[in-house]
Amino acid sequence: MLYAVGNHHAGTYYPAVVTVVPFLGAILRSGGPIARLRTLDVLIDLLGSFWPAAGFEVVATPTGNRALRDLLRQEVLGLEGDVLRCQVEAASAAESALAQQLLAELRQ
């Protein structure tokens, strides 16, 4: 997943990352336990340690230019309820811990 929207080794992402967030949300809502774990991992990486690739820091939107990092954060914030549900209804301690970590990242 991280190679599909960016460069995993470099810790960067491209504007396409914003378009995949709703699909990641669908996995959090209806995916199996392992799919939810890996999705939480991806979201933590994207928000916590990855950055827009050089030259893609700012993107054009219908309302004007926006920082890609801010757009991604805004999209993932829309999943906060799904992440909270993963924490509360976790199938494992690992899922609960990852959900808690992502929630902490979102609330920074």
Image (cartoon, grey):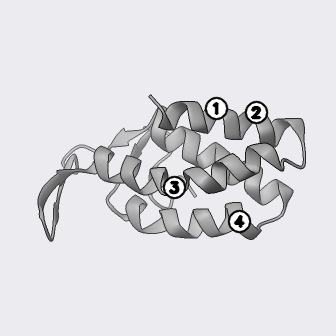
Which disc, if any, is residue 29?
A: 4
Q: Nearer the viewer, mark 2 or mark 3?
A: 2
Q: Amino acid at mark 4?
A: Arg
Q: CA distance from mark 4 to mark 1?
A: 18 Å
Q: Which residue is labeled 3 in the image?
A: 3
Q: Earlier in the sequence, mark 4 or mark 1?
A: 4
Is residue 11 or residue 76 the one in the foreground? Answer: 76
Q: Do the residues bearing badges 2 and 1 touch, measured as CB atoms within 8 Å?
A: yes
Q: Earlier in the sequence, mark 1 or mark 3?
A: 3
Q: Secondary structure at mark 1?
A: helix
On screen, residue 78 above or below 22 = above
Q: Residues within 10 Å of mark 1 (few under 14, many from 20)?
A: some
Q: CA distance from mark 2 to mark 3?
A: 24 Å
Q: Is residue 41 left or right of residue 37?
A: left
Q: Residues within 10 Å of mark 2 (few under 14, many from 20)?
A: some
Is residue 28 or residue 3 the one in the foreground? Answer: 28
Q: Earlier in the sequence, mark 4 or mark 2?
A: 4
Q: Earlier in the sequence, mark 4 or mark 3?
A: 3
Q: Amino acid at mark 2?
A: Ala
Q: Secondary structure at mark 3?
A: loop
In the rendered image, the quadrant that contains the C terminus is: top left
Q: Which residue is labeled 2 in the image?
A: 97
**Residue 26 point in image, percent of width and height:** 64, 69
On screen, residue 20 above or below 36 = below
